[in-house]
Image (tube, helix red, strand yellow):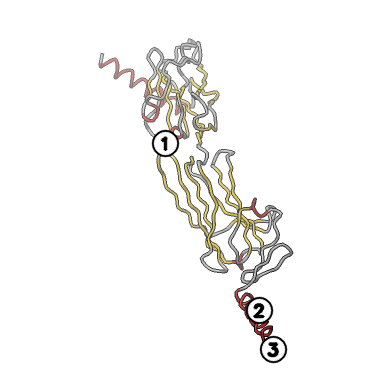
Protein backbone atom coordinates (compact mmCIF):
# COMPACT_ATOMS: atom_id res chain seq x y z
CA UNK A 1 0.00 0.00 0.00
CA UNK A 2 2.81 2.38 0.91
CA UNK A 3 4.43 1.69 -2.46
CA UNK A 4 1.17 2.58 -4.25
CA UNK A 5 0.82 5.87 -2.34
CA UNK A 6 4.40 6.85 -3.11
CA UNK A 7 3.87 6.00 -6.75
CA UNK A 8 0.74 8.18 -6.90
CA UNK A 9 2.59 11.08 -5.33
CA UNK A 10 5.43 10.73 -7.82
CA UNK A 11 2.98 10.59 -10.71
CA UNK A 12 1.21 13.72 -9.45
CA UNK A 13 4.51 15.58 -9.11
CA UNK A 14 5.67 14.39 -12.51
CA UNK A 15 2.40 15.39 -14.13
CA UNK A 16 2.48 18.85 -12.57
CA UNK A 17 6.07 19.43 -13.67
CA UNK A 18 5.31 18.30 -17.21
CA UNK A 19 2.26 20.56 -17.29
CA UNK A 20 4.32 23.52 -16.11
CA UNK A 21 7.01 22.88 -18.73
CA UNK A 22 4.68 22.25 -21.66
CA UNK A 23 2.07 24.81 -20.61
CA UNK A 24 -0.65 22.14 -20.73
CA UNK A 25 -3.24 21.86 -17.94
CA UNK A 26 -6.46 19.89 -17.90
CA UNK A 27 -8.14 22.25 -15.40
CA UNK A 28 -9.09 25.90 -15.86
CA UNK A 29 -10.94 28.13 -13.38
CA UNK A 30 -13.67 30.00 -15.24
CA UNK A 31 -14.73 32.33 -12.40
CA UNK A 32 -14.64 32.93 -8.67
CA UNK A 33 -17.77 34.37 -7.10
CA UNK A 34 -18.20 35.88 -3.63
CA UNK A 35 -19.57 39.13 -2.22
CA UNK A 36 -16.97 41.89 -2.34
CA UNK A 37 -18.41 43.84 0.61
CA UNK A 38 -20.57 42.56 3.48
CA UNK A 39 -21.98 44.48 6.45
CA UNK A 40 -21.03 42.66 9.62
CA UNK A 41 -23.99 40.74 11.04
CA UNK A 42 -26.25 41.41 8.05
CA UNK A 43 -26.16 37.92 6.45
CA UNK A 44 -26.60 34.43 7.95
CA UNK A 45 -24.00 33.07 5.51
CA UNK A 46 -21.89 33.84 2.44
CA UNK A 47 -20.76 31.51 -0.34
CA UNK A 48 -17.32 31.48 -1.93
CA UNK A 49 -17.69 29.65 -5.25
CA UNK A 50 -14.92 28.48 -7.55
CA UNK A 51 -16.19 27.22 -10.91
CA UNK A 52 -13.74 25.33 -13.12
CA UNK A 53 -13.65 23.29 -16.31
CA UNK A 54 -11.97 19.89 -16.75
CA UNK A 55 -10.64 19.10 -20.18
CA UNK A 56 -9.98 15.38 -19.88
CA UNK A 57 -11.64 13.10 -22.40
CA UNK A 58 -13.18 10.81 -19.79
CA UNK A 59 -13.59 13.59 -17.16
CA UNK A 60 -12.11 11.40 -14.48
CA UNK A 61 -9.70 14.20 -13.54
CA UNK A 62 -7.35 11.93 -11.64
CA UNK A 63 -5.92 13.55 -8.53
CA UNK A 64 -8.54 16.34 -8.38
CA UNK A 65 -8.22 18.47 -5.22
CA UNK A 66 -9.97 21.79 -4.49
CA UNK A 67 -8.36 24.02 -1.87
CA UNK A 68 -9.10 27.50 -0.57
CA UNK A 69 -6.47 29.75 1.00
CA UNK A 70 -6.89 32.99 2.94
CA UNK A 71 -4.48 35.90 2.51
CA UNK A 72 -0.89 34.68 2.26
CA UNK A 73 -1.15 31.67 4.52
CA UNK A 74 0.50 28.56 3.01
CA UNK A 75 -2.04 26.36 4.80
CA UNK A 76 -5.52 25.96 3.29
CA UNK A 77 -8.69 26.94 5.16
CA UNK A 78 -10.83 24.49 3.13
CA UNK A 79 -10.19 21.31 1.16
CA UNK A 80 -12.30 18.90 -0.85
CA UNK A 81 -11.31 15.71 -2.66
CA UNK A 82 -14.06 13.93 -4.65
CA UNK A 83 -15.25 10.90 -2.75
CA UNK A 84 -14.31 12.42 0.60
CA UNK A 85 -16.02 14.79 3.03
CA UNK A 86 -14.88 18.44 2.83
CA UNK A 87 -12.68 19.82 5.61
CA UNK A 88 -12.30 23.29 7.14
CA UNK A 89 -9.16 24.52 8.87
CA UNK A 90 -7.74 27.53 10.68
CA UNK A 91 -9.92 30.64 10.79
CA UNK A 92 -12.83 28.80 9.08
CA UNK A 93 -12.88 25.76 11.35
CA UNK A 94 -16.34 25.56 12.89
CA UNK A 95 -17.67 28.30 10.59
CA UNK A 96 -18.33 26.28 7.40
CA UNK A 97 -21.36 24.25 6.35
CA UNK A 98 -19.51 21.15 5.19
CA UNK A 99 -22.70 19.71 3.70
CA UNK A 100 -23.25 22.59 1.27
CA UNK A 101 -23.82 21.40 -2.32
CA UNK A 102 -23.31 23.80 -5.22
CA UNK A 103 -23.56 21.41 -8.20
CA UNK A 104 -24.93 18.02 -9.23
CA UNK A 105 -21.66 17.26 -11.02
CA UNK A 106 -19.79 14.70 -8.86
CA UNK A 107 -16.52 16.48 -9.73
CA UNK A 108 -17.85 19.86 -8.54
CA UNK A 109 -20.25 19.02 -5.69
CA UNK A 110 -18.31 20.69 -2.87
CA UNK A 111 -16.15 23.14 -4.78
CA UNK A 112 -17.78 26.10 -2.93
CA UNK A 113 -17.38 27.20 0.68
CA UNK A 114 -20.43 28.32 2.66
CA UNK A 115 -19.28 30.43 5.62
CA UNK A 116 -21.89 30.53 8.38
CA UNK A 117 -22.31 33.70 10.49
CA UNK A 118 -19.45 35.58 8.82
CA UNK A 119 -17.62 38.12 10.99
CA UNK A 120 -15.05 40.83 10.36
CA UNK A 121 -12.28 38.36 11.28
CA UNK A 122 -13.11 36.42 8.10
CA UNK A 123 -12.32 39.28 5.75
CA UNK A 124 -9.40 38.78 3.39
CA UNK A 125 -8.08 37.71 0.01
CA UNK A 126 -9.38 34.22 -0.79
CA UNK A 127 -7.56 32.05 -3.32
CA UNK A 128 -9.14 29.03 -4.95
CA UNK A 129 -6.58 26.46 -6.12
CA UNK A 130 -7.65 23.45 -8.21
CA UNK A 131 -5.13 20.72 -8.99
CA UNK A 132 -5.08 17.42 -10.86
CA UNK A 133 -2.22 15.16 -11.79
CA UNK A 134 -2.05 16.98 -15.13
CA UNK A 135 -2.30 20.59 -14.10
CA UNK A 136 -3.16 23.35 -11.68
CA UNK A 137 -5.01 26.67 -11.78
CA UNK A 138 -5.76 29.33 -9.17
CA UNK A 139 -7.68 32.60 -8.81
CA UNK A 140 -7.99 35.19 -6.03
CA UNK A 141 -10.72 37.59 -4.92
CA UNK A 142 -11.11 39.92 -1.93
CA UNK A 143 -14.01 39.92 0.51
CA UNK A 144 -14.37 42.70 3.11
CA UNK A 145 -16.75 42.23 6.04
CA UNK A 146 -16.95 45.69 7.57
CA UNK A 147 -18.23 47.08 10.85
CA UNK A 148 -19.53 50.69 10.83
CA UNK A 149 -18.38 53.12 13.49
CA UNK A 150 -20.17 52.63 16.80
CA UNK A 151 -19.39 56.21 17.74
CA UNK A 152 -17.85 59.24 16.02
CA UNK A 153 -17.33 62.71 17.42
CA UNK A 154 -15.52 65.94 16.49
CA UNK A 155 -14.56 68.28 19.34
CA UNK A 156 -12.22 71.19 19.98
CA UNK A 157 -10.53 73.08 22.79
CA UNK A 158 -8.83 76.48 23.11
CA UNK A 159 -5.32 76.09 24.59
CA UNK A 160 -4.63 79.74 23.69
CA UNK A 161 -6.58 82.72 22.35
CA UNK A 162 -5.38 82.31 18.78
CA UNK A 163 -5.12 78.50 18.68
CA UNK A 164 -7.57 75.66 18.36
CA UNK A 165 -6.96 71.99 19.21
CA UNK A 166 -9.14 69.77 16.98
CA UNK A 167 -9.87 66.15 17.95
CA UNK A 168 -11.78 63.54 15.95
CA UNK A 169 -12.53 60.24 17.70
CA UNK A 170 -13.85 57.09 15.98
CA UNK A 171 -14.70 53.93 17.90
CA UNK A 172 -15.55 50.29 17.04
CA UNK A 173 -14.87 50.21 13.29
CA UNK A 174 -13.41 47.63 10.86
CA UNK A 175 -11.32 47.42 8.67
CA UNK A 176 -8.62 49.90 9.64
CA UNK A 177 -10.18 53.24 8.71
CA UNK A 178 -8.83 56.35 7.02
CA UNK A 179 -9.63 59.48 9.04
CA UNK A 180 -8.97 62.95 7.59
CA UNK A 181 -9.69 66.48 8.79
CA UNK A 182 -10.61 69.18 6.27
CA UNK A 183 -10.91 72.96 6.71
CA UNK A 184 -12.23 75.74 4.49
CA UNK A 185 -14.46 78.77 4.29
CA UNK A 186 -17.20 76.49 2.90
CA UNK A 187 -17.84 72.87 1.92
CA UNK A 188 -16.90 73.59 -1.69
CA UNK A 189 -13.69 75.37 -0.76
CA UNK A 190 -11.68 73.22 1.61
CA UNK A 191 -8.27 71.59 2.06
CA UNK A 192 -6.98 68.52 3.87
CA UNK A 193 -5.12 69.44 7.04
CA UNK A 194 -1.54 68.17 7.19
CA UNK A 195 0.55 67.11 10.15
CA UNK A 196 -2.24 65.21 11.90
CA UNK A 197 -1.41 63.23 15.00
CA UNK A 198 -2.98 59.77 14.62
CA UNK A 199 -3.38 57.19 17.39
CA UNK A 200 -4.88 53.76 16.63
CA UNK A 201 -5.74 50.86 18.92
CA UNK A 202 -7.23 47.39 18.37
CA UNK A 203 -9.70 45.73 20.72
CA UNK A 204 -12.38 43.02 20.33
CA UNK A 205 -11.96 42.87 16.55
CA UNK A 206 -12.37 46.60 15.91
CA UNK A 207 -10.32 49.79 15.70
CA UNK A 208 -10.44 52.96 17.77
CA UNK A 209 -8.82 55.97 16.10
CA UNK A 210 -8.01 59.39 17.55
CA UNK A 211 -6.86 62.16 15.19
CA UNK A 212 -5.66 65.51 16.57
CA UNK A 213 -4.42 68.80 15.13
CA UNK A 214 -3.23 71.98 16.90
CA UNK A 215 -3.73 74.87 14.50
CA UNK A 216 -3.07 78.61 14.58
CA UNK A 217 -5.89 81.03 13.72
CA UNK A 218 -3.70 82.65 11.07
CA UNK A 219 -3.76 79.39 9.11
CA UNK A 220 -7.56 79.27 9.08
CA UNK A 221 -10.24 81.36 7.37
CA UNK A 222 -11.92 83.93 9.68
CA UNK A 223 -15.02 81.73 9.64
CA UNK A 224 -13.92 78.14 9.08
CA UNK A 225 -15.85 74.93 8.47
CA UNK A 226 -13.90 72.06 10.06
CA UNK A 227 -14.91 68.56 8.96
CA UNK A 228 -13.75 65.09 10.02
CA UNK A 229 -14.25 62.40 7.35
CA UNK A 230 -14.12 58.64 7.98
CA UNK A 231 -13.79 56.14 5.11
CA UNK A 232 -13.25 52.37 5.05
CA UNK A 233 -10.90 50.99 2.34
CA UNK A 234 -12.49 48.79 -0.34
CA UNK A 235 -16.02 49.85 0.69
CA UNK A 236 -18.40 52.74 -0.02
CA UNK A 237 -18.77 53.45 3.69
CA UNK A 238 -18.28 57.14 4.59
CA UNK A 239 -19.22 59.22 7.64
CA UNK A 240 -18.43 62.81 8.60
CA UNK A 241 -18.86 65.36 11.40
CA UNK A 242 -18.57 69.17 11.12
CA UNK A 243 -18.10 72.18 13.37
CA UNK A 244 -17.88 75.94 12.71
CA UNK A 245 -14.93 77.98 14.01
CA UNK A 246 -14.55 81.75 14.35
CA UNK A 247 -11.18 83.31 15.08
CA UNK A 248 -10.61 83.78 18.79
CA UNK A 249 -13.78 81.95 19.87
CA UNK A 250 -14.62 78.40 20.76
CA UNK A 251 -15.83 76.29 17.79
CA UNK A 252 -19.53 75.43 17.61
CA UNK A 253 -21.57 72.65 16.13
CA UNK A 254 -22.42 73.55 12.54
CA UNK A 255 -26.12 72.89 13.19
CA UNK A 256 -26.15 75.31 16.12
CA UNK A 257 -24.82 78.28 14.15
CA UNK A 258 -27.02 78.07 11.07
CA UNK A 259 -28.88 81.35 10.79
CA UNK A 260 -27.28 82.70 13.96
CA UNK A 261 -25.79 86.23 13.97
CA UNK A 262 -22.04 86.67 13.97
CA UNK A 263 -20.50 86.43 17.41
CA UNK A 264 -19.20 89.69 18.94
CA UNK A 265 -15.49 90.13 19.25
CA UNK A 266 -14.06 88.81 22.54
CA UNK A 267 -13.74 91.45 25.25
CA UNK A 268 -16.43 93.71 23.80
CA UNK A 269 -19.95 94.24 25.13
CA UNK A 270 -23.01 95.16 23.12
CA UNK A 271 -26.46 96.59 23.81
CA UNK A 272 -29.62 95.56 22.03
CA UNK A 273 -33.28 96.51 22.23
CA UNK A 274 -34.23 93.42 24.26
CA UNK A 275 -31.19 92.79 26.42
CA UNK A 276 -27.87 94.35 27.32
CA UNK A 277 -24.49 93.36 28.62
CA UNK A 278 -22.88 95.95 30.93
CA UNK A 279 -19.20 95.99 31.86
CA UNK A 280 -18.18 96.10 35.57
CA UNK A 281 -16.70 99.58 35.05
CA UNK A 282 -19.97 100.89 33.63
CA UNK A 283 -21.91 99.44 36.55
CA UNK A 284 -19.69 101.18 39.12
CA UNK A 285 -19.90 104.46 37.19
CA UNK A 286 -23.70 104.31 37.32
CA UNK A 287 -23.70 103.73 41.08
CA UNK A 288 -21.45 106.72 41.59
CA UNK A 289 -23.77 108.94 39.53
CA UNK A 290 -26.82 107.85 41.51
CA UNK A 291 -25.02 108.39 44.82
CA UNK A 292 -23.94 111.89 43.77
CA UNK A 293 -27.46 112.73 42.64
CA UNK A 294 -28.88 111.58 45.98
CA UNK A 295 -26.50 113.84 47.97
CA UNK A 296 -27.28 116.86 45.85
CA UNK A 297 -31.00 116.42 46.50
CA UNK A 298 -30.45 116.58 50.27
CA UNK A 299 -28.44 119.88 50.15
CA UNK A 300 -30.36 123.08 51.10
CA UNK A 301 -31.08 125.55 48.35
Q: Quadrant of residue 257?
A: bottom right
SS under mark 3: loop
Q: Is residue 8 visible?
A: yes
Q: Which mark is residue 300?
A: 3
- Between residue 105 and residue 11, name the one nearer to us: 105
Mark 1 or 3 closer to N-term? 1
Q: Quadrant of the C terminus?
A: bottom right
Q: Is residue 133 visible?
A: no
| Residue 129 higher or lower than 64, as above or below | below
Mark 3 or 2 closer to N-term? 2
Give the labeled residue for mark 2.
290
- Between residue 113 and residue 267, name the one nearer to us: 267
- Between residue 260 and residue 50, name the one nearer to us: 260
Marks 1 and 3: CB-CB under 8 Å? no
Q: Nearer the viewer, mark 2 or mark 1?
A: 2
Give the labeled residue for mark 1.
72
Q: CA distance from mark 3 to mark 2?
A: 18 Å
- Residue at image coords 56%, 44%: 231
Q: Position of residue 152 (x, y in %)?
A: 53, 46
Q: Position of residue 292 (x, y in %)?
A: 65, 83
Amino acid sequence: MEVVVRSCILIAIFGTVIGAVTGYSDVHISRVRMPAVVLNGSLPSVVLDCDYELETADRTAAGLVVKWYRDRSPAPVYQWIPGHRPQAFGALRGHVNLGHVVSDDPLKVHRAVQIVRPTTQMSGDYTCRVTTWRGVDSATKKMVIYAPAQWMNLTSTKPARHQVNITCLVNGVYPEPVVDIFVGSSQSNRRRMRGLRVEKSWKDGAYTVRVQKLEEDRHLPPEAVIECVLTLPDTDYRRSRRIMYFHGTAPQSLASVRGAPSAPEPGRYSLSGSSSAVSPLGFLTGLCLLWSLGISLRLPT
